[in-house]
Image (cartoon, rainbow, N blue to C red):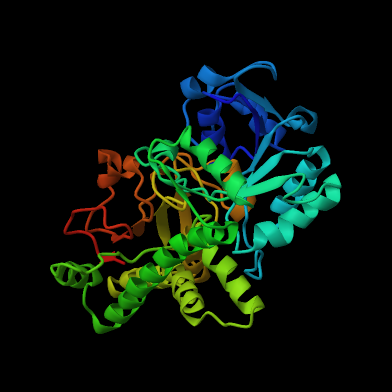
Amino acid sequence: MIKMKISIIGLGYVGLPLALEFSKKYQVVGFDINKQRIEQLKNGIDKTKERTSVEIQKVLNKDSIGNGLFLTNNVDFIKNSEIYIVTVPTPITFAKTPDLNPLISASEMIGEVLVKGDIVIYESTVYPGCTEEVCVPILEDASGLVFNKDFFCGYSPERINPGDKLNTLTKIKKVTSGSNATIARKVDELYKSIIKAGTHLASSIKVAEASKVIENAQRDVNISFVNELALIFDRIGIDTNEVLEAAATKWNFLHYKPGLVGGHCISVDPYYLAYKAEELGYHPAVLLSGRRVNDQMGKFVGAKVIKLMINKGFVIKNSNILLLGITFKENCPDIRNSKIIDIHTELLSYGANVDVYDPIAEKDEVIAQFDVNLIEDLKSIDYDAVIFAVAHDNFLSEEFQELVTDKRIIFDLKDMIDSPYVDGRL
């Protein structure tokens, strides 16, 4: 095995698992600008809950020499690496356009330490062309080196599924690419050394970039279709899930379910592709119409709960509603782009009092991002309505099932409660 030094830039949901796997075979420097994150990881604490303390401590190297993982927020320690892998976030702005600031900052930092022969691999989700059109010029300017002569690039899109303990990094096939044929093979061999499921070598960086955005855009469009069906069937007065179960008896029916579409991928990636399309003079009607449908579902759920309460005789002003869950998906502390907050906002607009309980979310992060104080335990309040918004395993326990009675409105957003007392589902 070829010995080399690899620096992973960004130690979040994507970077940390990658750093841990590579450090089993190579000398790896894990870099993050967040000093608190570095200190937590040094103590074996991963607040994303993607990896255990044992997994982290097993590969942790206390100095920067030798195989294993060395953690730092000091840029000096990434110098002399041969491979730089960028796994920083690529969110969207308030105007729903790509926010490339983290990617630009990482490229500038790497450019300052880049030397001849180095390879920079990007894993962050971007639009097709971004690596070569945005990142490469920054690397050239900061380093004074020439692309594809002095240094090289690769792109291998991340496929991390937060909270999924089965489909983990090494078990998911990895798309790879490089800035020329030789580098492409090197990048592919590098990932093959840790990815048990194998790799798929794309013909170009642009193809690899495009493959990533359409993976999630496809899911977004499919979910938007069934969400629109839910809006239609709600007006007709029939149960969407019953309709889908009936339709699914046909062999080639794709059984997607309606729901809120949040998180850092599915609700973001279509805007990256749309941005590039519009830059080239094409308006992506299907992509953006799907986004519009999905973005309104939180408000729809909030309004539907209010209607159910009115129909059952509840006075809405100063009513008490319990919202169970605020993360964007089950059994995961990630709150990025969670659409549960849209339900919360809608309920407040009717004058209801809303408590939010989530034992998995980080309380301080929820306050910082949503200005919402999570309650720490279930209060003795006689709630008028309870919304099961996120399918955390915790919510299947007896403590929460006891909340399901005919004395209050029960709305099951994730179709997780089997009870005749459920008043509504999406």
In the image, residue 215 lies at what x, y percent? 44, 60
Camera sees residue 346: yes
In the visual, does 393 lie left or right of 334?
A: left
Name the foreground residue: 91 vs 385.
91
Name the foreground residue: 24 vs 95.
24
Residue at horizontal 85 percent and vertical 52 percent from the top: 141
In the visual, does 141 lie left or right of 240?
A: right
Camera sees residue 371: no
In the image, residue 419 lies at what x, y percent? 18, 55
In the visual, does 48 lie left or right of 108?
A: left
**In the rendered image, the vertical position of residue 373 relative to residue 50, given as above or below:** below
In the image, residue 97 lies at what x, y percent? 65, 68
Residue at horizontal 22 percent and vertical 67 percent from the top: 241
Residue at horizontal 46 percent and vertical 53 percent from the top: 328
Name the foreground residue: 174 vs 223.
174
Q: Quadrant of the C terminus?
A: bottom left
In the image, residue 239 lies at what x, y percent? 22, 72
Residue at horizontal 31 percent and vertical 57 percent from the top: 414
**In the rendered image, the vertical position of residue 66 relative to residue 332, given as above or below:** above
Q: How many marks?
A: 0
